[in-house]
Image (cartoon, rainbow, N blue to C red):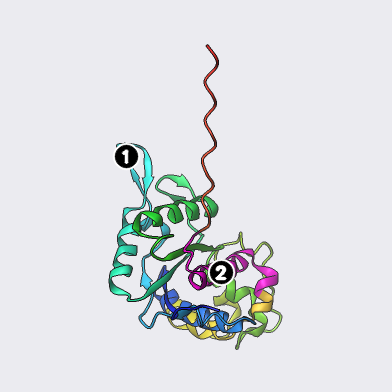
Amino acid sequence: MSMTSPKRLVAFVEGVGDKAAVPILLKRLLSDWAESPWDALFLDDKPPFEVGEVSNLVQLDKATNTLHCAEWERLLTQAQRTRKNLGAVLLLLDGDIPKVAGQEFCPVTFARLLADAARRAGGGTLFSVAVVFLLPEYEALLIASHESLPNINPGAQMPHNLEEKRSGKGWLGKNLKGGYKQATDQAELTEYLRFDLLRERLKSFCRLERALQELTTAVRTGSHIVSPVVPPAPPSEAAPPT
């Protein structure tokens, strides 16, 4: 158990629908654990930071042809300044973007890039940070738990390769009676998610849950982290003997 008072968990999300849905998701998921996290964390009482897609946080420096995350670092500094008692930050974005700053999008590569950049704003020392991409988008959670959703059409079939298939909003629009409106329906439907189904069907949901567990442990023990861990650069080859 934590020997100090709980610290604030702040979320960064992509859009309006996520801004309403993610606090519900986090409260339900954290409350579902056998070992309560509330001795270490409490959920931010303000709405999540809305940051748009990952391309808003990662840019290409044309002079050096390298990627940088100045906007992400600025937002983390802002969170530290405006959210008192900050203990942990979760960046939760969709992973359905084909390219970022001219590069093919890879959730592992860009999660590590953003995690590493967080260190320059105090991540891993002053507070903990986890970066998670839901694949391909938040709506995959709803589809993977479609049996529990209200007003689902009888016989609705979950798509194969759900984490690779886009147009989840289209699937929900066709299979929910009355259609699907992200801005209003996403939060309401999040109340009906079945976490046992999500754990079986979505690797990215399992990654989200592991990340939250990592944040909880880090805050509880006072050993701040960034997640995913950025592997060390391989050692350079030794110079040949002369």
- State the SS at label 2: helix
Of residue 219 and residue 118, the one placed in the foreground of this image is 219
**Total number of numbered discs in the rendering:** 2
- Observer-side mark, 1 or 2, equals 1
**Dot 2 amino acid type:** Gly
**Furthest residue toward bottom:** 150
- Give residue 102's quadrant in the image: top left
**Dot 1 amino acid type:** Lys
Residue 220 percent coordinates (x, y): 51, 73
* Type of secondary structure dominating the magenta stretch: helix
Residue 188 percent coordinates (x, y): 50, 86
Q: CA distance from mark 1 to mark 2?
A: 35 Å
Residue depicted at 62% across the width and 67% down the height: 206
Give yes or no for residue 202 being in the magenta stretch.
Answer: yes
Residue depicted at 45% across the width and 63% down the height: 129
- State the SS at label 1: loop
Q: Which residues are magenta?
A: 198-226
Task: Give the numbered dot on residue 62.
Answer: 1
Label 2 CA crowd tier, 10 Å (few <14, some 14–19, many 20+): many
Residue 26 percent coordinates (x, y): 51, 78
Q: Which residue is mark 2?
A: 168
User: Is any atom of residue 124 visible in this view?
Assistant: yes
Image-based side of 160 in relation to 228, left or right? right
